[in-house]
Image (cartoon, helix red, strand yellow):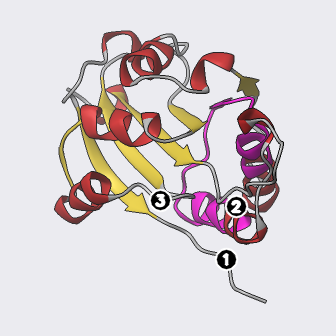
Amino acid sequence: MTAGTFRRLVVLRHAKSAWPPDVPDAERPLGPRGLRDAPAAGRWLREGDCEPDLVVCSPARRTRQTWDLAAAESGVTAPVTYEERVYGASTEELLDLVRETPAQVRTLLLVGHNPGAQELVLSLAGEGDARGLEQARTKFPTSAIAVLRVPGPWSSLVPGAARLTDLVVPRGAKP
């Protein structure tokens, strides 16, 4: 298999949210730490050369805010799809979404929630960075970014087929 047949899946868990009273879960905004960390995630995407060709984002307020702040810092101009199915999705539902990715997309960025984001990464990563895999098993914190190398077409992606190449948790500087 040539290097050209590999794709890259980048999974970003939304930044830290606030818990205002009487606000529905889907409308919870980012909290102060999230407002600091989301731009740091964008800087990491830029510096880590992880510019996506397509972004699939949950429509929840905290994921949209995370992506808006990260995109502004990263300079990413890829099209964004706000997909209802990401919110509250199971591992299998997220995997189905990834399999629907158009063939011409080389790097897909998925902005979502736990436990789905963590479980998707663990399900797909058959091997890879040992420290990153252990971190993902232990905790997939807010603003965590996992980068998976995916062999072959998106449509044939199966659990255990990918390789975890990076797992980072970018944090913004406190004022």
What's the residue type where badge 2 is placed? Ala
Name the secondary structure under disc 3: loop
The CA distance from mark 3 to mark 1 is 14 Å
Q: Which residue is mark 1?
A: 172
Left or right: where 130 falls relative to 45: left
Left or right: where 67 falls relative to 114: right
What's the residue type where badge 1 is placed? Gly
Name the secondary structure under disc 1: loop
Question: Is disc 2 surrounded by few (<14), some (14 to 19) or many (20+) residues within 10 Å?
Answer: many
For the magenta stretch, what is the residue range? 39-66
Question: Is disc 3 surrounded by few (<14), some (14 to 19) or many (20+) residues within 10 Å?
Answer: some
Q: Nearer the viewer, residue 55 or 37?
A: 37
The CA distance from mark 3 to mark 2 is 13 Å
Q: Nearer the viewer, mark 3 or mark 1?
A: 3
The picture places residue 173, in percent across and down from the top left corner, at 69, 84
Residue most extreme to the bottom: 175
Q: Nearer the viewer, residue 137 or 104?
A: 137
Check residue 141 in the rendering and tell me which mark sits there, or answer none: 3
Instruction: Determine whether label 3 and label 2 are within 8 Å by CB.
Output: no
Check residue 38 in the rendering and tell me which mark sits there, or answer none: 2
What residue appears at the point 45 percent right and 15 percent down from the top-left corner? 93
Point out the tag, 3 or 2, that comes first from the N-terminus. Answer: 2
Instruction: Determine whether label 1 and label 2 are within 8 Å by CB.
Output: yes
What residue appears at the point 26 percent right and 32 percent down from the top-left corner? 123
